[in-house]
């Protein structure tokens, strides 16, 4: 029998669980004010993603994690779709590993145009990712309609 995937907002009482997953990946920890989504299959937490405020109009979508046994089941796409529905931001940056950037381009993310000023918080995170991770990252932007 195929178990259904549900996506919901992570409760503050589950923040330690989320940050333990992020620590395992070498990702920055989340704060209580971040909007964190959790994916569950059969009541078991199998994935995460988050929206982090940059300023009132700008955010960053990131922190995507799917447990190895559940990869390839489109869970990341479901988390992205859920977070985009929740996003209050006009400009949403994303810094995916380049090998999975196509997941985000399907949702309207594009390479950042040359005339866009990338906020320092995002630019600093891109630099950190390029230093910390052996695989390349992309910088993408989605502008709300």
Image (cartoon, rainbow, N blue to C red):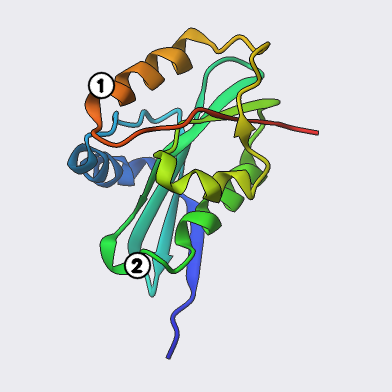
Left or right placement of residue 145 versus residue 113 in this view? right
Comparing 49 with 131, the one in front is 131
Q: Residue furthest right?
A: 145
Q: CA distance from mark 1 to mark 2?
A: 28 Å
Pick whichever, 81 or 125, lies toward us: 125
Q: Tell me the residue at 32%/46% (across/down).
A: 14
Residue at 44% across, 69% down: 73
Q: Locate residue 79, reporting x and y percent.
A: 51, 53
Q: Residue 15: where, in percent of width, then height?
A: 31, 40
Split into 4 quadrants, where in the image is the N terminus? bottom left
Q: Residues within 10 Å of mark 1 (few under 14, many from 20)?
A: few
* Quarter placement of the C terminus: top right
Residue occupying image coordinates x 54% and y 58%: 78
Q: Residue at x 58, y 14 (%)?
A: 55
**Which residue is the site of mark 1?**
131
Tell me which label, 1 or 2, sits earlier in the chain: 2
**Cβ atoms at labels 1 and 2 below 8 Å apart:** no
Q: Is residue 133 above or below residue 49?
A: above
Frontmost residue, 64 versus 12: 64
Q: Is residue 65 above or below residue 16?
A: below
Q: Nearer the viewer, residue 140 or 99?
A: 99
Residue, far bottom: 1
Crowding at mark 2 (Cα within 10 Å: few <14, some 14-19, many 20+): few
Disc 1, SS: helix
Helix, strand or loop for disc 2: helix
Residue for badge 2? 70
Q: For residue 129, what is the image quadrant?
A: top left
Q: Is residue 23 left or right of residue 138?
A: left
Q: Nearer the viewer, mark 1 or mark 2?
A: 1
């Amino acid at each position: 029998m195929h178990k259904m995937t549900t996506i919901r907002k992570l409760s503050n009482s589950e923040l330690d669980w989320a940050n333990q997953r992020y620590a395992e990946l070498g990702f920055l920890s989340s704060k209580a004010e971040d909007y964190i989504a959790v994916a569950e299959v059969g009541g078991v937490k199998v994935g995460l993603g988050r929206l982090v405020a940059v300023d009132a109009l700008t955010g960053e979508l990131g922190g995507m994690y799917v447990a190895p046994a559940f990869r390839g089941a489109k869970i990341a796409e479901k988390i992205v779709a859920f977070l985009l529905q929740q996003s209050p931001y006009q400009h949403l940056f994303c810094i995916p590993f380049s090998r999975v950037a196509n997941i985000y381009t399907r949702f309207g993310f594009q390479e950042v145009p040359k005339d866009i000023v990338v906020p320092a918080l995002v630019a600093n995170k891109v630099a950190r990712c390029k230093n910390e991770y052996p695989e390349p990252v992309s910088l993408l932007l989605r502008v709300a309609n």
